[in-house]
């Protein structure tokens, strides 16, 4: 599981923070979470396409260990009241309509 996040959303968050006196590490990802399958389904839905898709297990090369669940939380942004990131579906829709 992951949170698809557009560079536009991250750039907007950074732009808002760059004028402040923020220090340390901040996670900046869109809200929500999905599997890669759910992400693909949403992309095709926005494009008006209906391919036959089915979820599958992702197999990673053991030399490159990766967590199955890699969703980050914008905890510090939220605690400071400066989280501007959209839900990933809303962000994807914005990206789709901008193209």
Image (cartoon, rainbow, N blue to C red):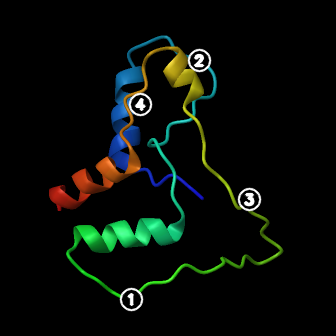
In the picture provided, is 93 more to the left or to the right than 61? left
Q: Name the residue under label 2.
A: 23
Q: Residue 52 carries which label?
A: 1
Disc 3 to disc 4, C-alpha distance: 26 Å
In this rendering, which labeled residue sits more in front, label 3 or label 2? 3
Among numbered discs 1 and 4, the one appearing first in the sequence: 4
Check disc 1 and report its element: helix, strand or loop.
loop
Q: Which residue lies furthest to the top in this view?
A: 21
Check disc 3 and report its element: helix, strand or loop.
loop
Quarter of the rendering occupied by the C terminus: bottom left
In this rendering, which labeled residue sits more in front, label 1 or label 2? 1
Disc 1 to disc 3, C-alpha distance: 27 Å
Quarter of the rendering occupied by the N terminus: bottom right
As drawn, 5 above or below 86: below
Disc 1 to disc 4, C-alpha distance: 38 Å
Check disc 4 and report its element: helix, strand or loop.
helix
Q: Do the residues labelled 2 and 4 touch (CB within 8 Å)?
A: no
């Amino acid at each position: 599981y992951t949170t698809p996040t557009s560079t536009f959303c991250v750039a907007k968050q950074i732009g808002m923070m760059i004028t402040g006196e923020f220090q340390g590490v901040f996670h900046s990802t869109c809200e929500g979470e999905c599997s890669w399958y759910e992400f693909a389904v949403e992309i095709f839905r926005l494009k008006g396409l209906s391919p036959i898709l089915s979820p599958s297990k992702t197999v990673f090369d053991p030399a490159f260990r990766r967590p199955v669940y890699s969703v980050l939380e914008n905890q510090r942004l939220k605690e400071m009241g400066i989280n501007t990131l959209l839900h990933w579906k809303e962000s994807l829709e914005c990206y789709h309509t901008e193209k």
